Image (tube, coloured by chain):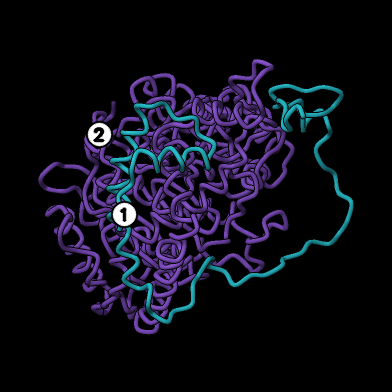
Chain colours: A purple, B cyan
Amino acid sequence: MSDHIIRLTAAETAEKIASGELTAVEVTEAHLARIEAVDEKVHAFLHVDREGALAQARAVDEKRARGEKLGPLAGVPLALKDIFTTEGIPTTVGSKILEGWIPPYDATLTKRLKAADVVILGKTNMDEFAMGSSTENSAYGPTGNPWDLTRIPGGSGGGSSAALASFQAPLAIGTDTGGSIRQPAAVTGTVGVKPTYGAVSRYGMVAFSSSLDQGGPCARTVLDAALLHEVIAGHDPMDSTSIDAPVPPVVEAARNGSVAGMRVGVVKQFRGEGYQAGVVQRFDESVELLKELGAEVVELDCPSFDLALSAYYLIAPSECSSNLARFDGLRYGLRTGDDGTRSAEEVTSLTREAGFGDEVKRRIMLGTYALSSGYYDAYYGSAQKVRTLIKQEFERAFEQVDVIVSPTTPTTAFPIGERADDPMAMYLADLCTIPTNLAGNAAMSLPCGLAPEDDLPVGLQIIAPAMKDDRLYKVGAAVEAAFVEKWGHPLIEEAPSL
Amino acid sequence: MPGITREEVAHLARLARLELKPEELDHFAGQLDDIIGAVARVSEVADQDVPPTSHPLPLTNVMRADEVRPSLTPEQALSGAPAQEQQRFKVPQILGEE
């Protein structure tokens, strides 16, 4: 029975709770039992809030008993990336510098989830401060990919993607600065969406690179992602970069998947050296499938995309070097070396040395370098120009096509440890996802098969213009339905049962 | 492009308030040099007449109504403080003795 419950989609779960076929407490208990059974192996969660989750579930069941109308995700369990503040529940961002910190307030996203009666099971593992593509940079140890526990689950949101792929939760939340929702989704055979920049409030989301960071939904199906998208998106006066406009009709789009008559762009820069053969093969098959479904495929040339990775690794570190200045050991979090003789500056330097991991230190120093006088114009200034060029190339592309498709990642999940000491090799995992962050538009990753050479999931990326997030779901739902028909079942059913 | 030396890493670490250990200086010097060597490609566009983009949304001076709203209590605001005294954050000495 409980194995049946954990394999339901979020939409099915909500329906069964609303109809009385299942109680929210039963659903939560089934997932807590699953966490208990498998998370020692997977290590998706940093903190499980058993009591809080059960209390939320009981409240949903009481609401139903009183005859109150339940929201579309009421009682559905969710795994929350440990980057969003949760009142009374630890929030570490995968860093020692915030170990044991209990936030005194909820992020806007956390508040929205609670208001929608989504049951928060706990907080998921991540690369420290969301800096990484493998979750190996977590100060609390790596997370395994449920398809092969010796491989990475992607990053930075590897805990969230692994929780979904191991059926520990049907919904999860991620954040995407350069691909941290989409790349983990791709390598775990799940669905992840980076909404348009500004769609989901950043209030209470620990800042890494503020002009790129965007929270978004993760799930095992396109419809589930859409239902979650609708819950978390919307204007927030607490975030000055939050878009003050209606949320695009994502759920309606996910329920009416179609690509008939659509123009789909394929960018020539998203292939070539560094792309695994099986990834390219599955991508080419997806393009053929889109044609069969009635889409017109258009070749696009976006030459500045070749500079996106370089621009990103100047812009993101620059912003992070400034954002992370707040971790000074004075007001919250770790403080070390305060022996009564040292100055505040010395204590701050010792605290940051002890509290930050290698990748965070690298990026802070890289950003400090890129912003120093003498180098500013050549590095940060040029990176900002590249950003303009990429934005313009997307704008020209979207005059010709409705959406763009590409592989989400150049390779499938690599073994834990393989790229840990080679930062540049690690950065290449985000080759296809970064241009979208720089331009601020919307993108999704969904599974498009297993690579023949290693039987690991491959992700198809769909990119839409800003504020046209609904197109992702319309196209994604059509592709997903066609694949399920072709395979006879959703891809995730082929994941090992653990 | 100049290579990143051990001394430069030490300087960056000082600016960034990171009390790096000696062995870290060598480790990071090599890695930062590799990364900067790779990302320096962006300077291909340095001479192009292109306006810079610092943010995806063209927003300036977004304001909220200036109204009194509920906020954290002093106890909540201080709840994560490493040290506190008289409802204030207690910090190590900031100014010198003289």
The residue under the point 64% across, 22% down is A342
Q: Position of B79 compared to A419: left or right?
A: right
- Which amino acid type is marked by label 1? Pro
Q: In the rendered image, which quarter contains the C terminus of chain A?
A: top left
Q: In the rendered image, which quarter contains the N terminus of chain A?
A: top left
Q: Which labelled disc corresponds to residue A418?
A: none
Counting from the top left corner in percent of width and height, residue A80 is at 52, 38
Counting from the top left corner in percent of width and height, residue A187 is at 29, 45
Q: Residues within 10 Å of mark 1 (few under 14, many from 20)?
A: few
The residue under the point 59% across, 19% down is A337
| Residue closer to the observer: A145 or B37 | B37
The residue that disc 2 covers is A151
Q: Looking at the image, is B69 positioned above or below residue B29?
A: below
> How far apart, in angstroms, are the residues tagged by discs 1 and 2?
37 Å
Q: How many marks?
A: 2
Q: Does the CB distance between marks 1 and 2 fall below 8 Å?
A: no
Helix, strand or loop under label 1:
loop
- Which chain is disc 1 placed on? B
Q: Residues within 10 Å of mark 2 (few under 14, many from 20)?
A: many
Residue A490 shows in this picture = no
Counting from the top left corner in percent of width and height, residue A142 is at 36, 29
Counting from the top left corner in percent of width and height, residue A227 is at 52, 53
Q: Looking at the image, is B36 positioned above or below residue A426?
A: below
Residue extending farthest to the front is: B98
The residue that disc 1 covers is B2
- Which chain is disc 2 placed on? A
| Residue closer to the observer: B31 or A206 | B31
Q: Position of B9 compared to A148: left or right?
A: right
| Residue closer to the observer: B87 or A279 | B87
The residue under the point 26% across, 72% down is A266
Residue A331 shows in this picture = yes
Helix, strand or loop under label 2:
loop
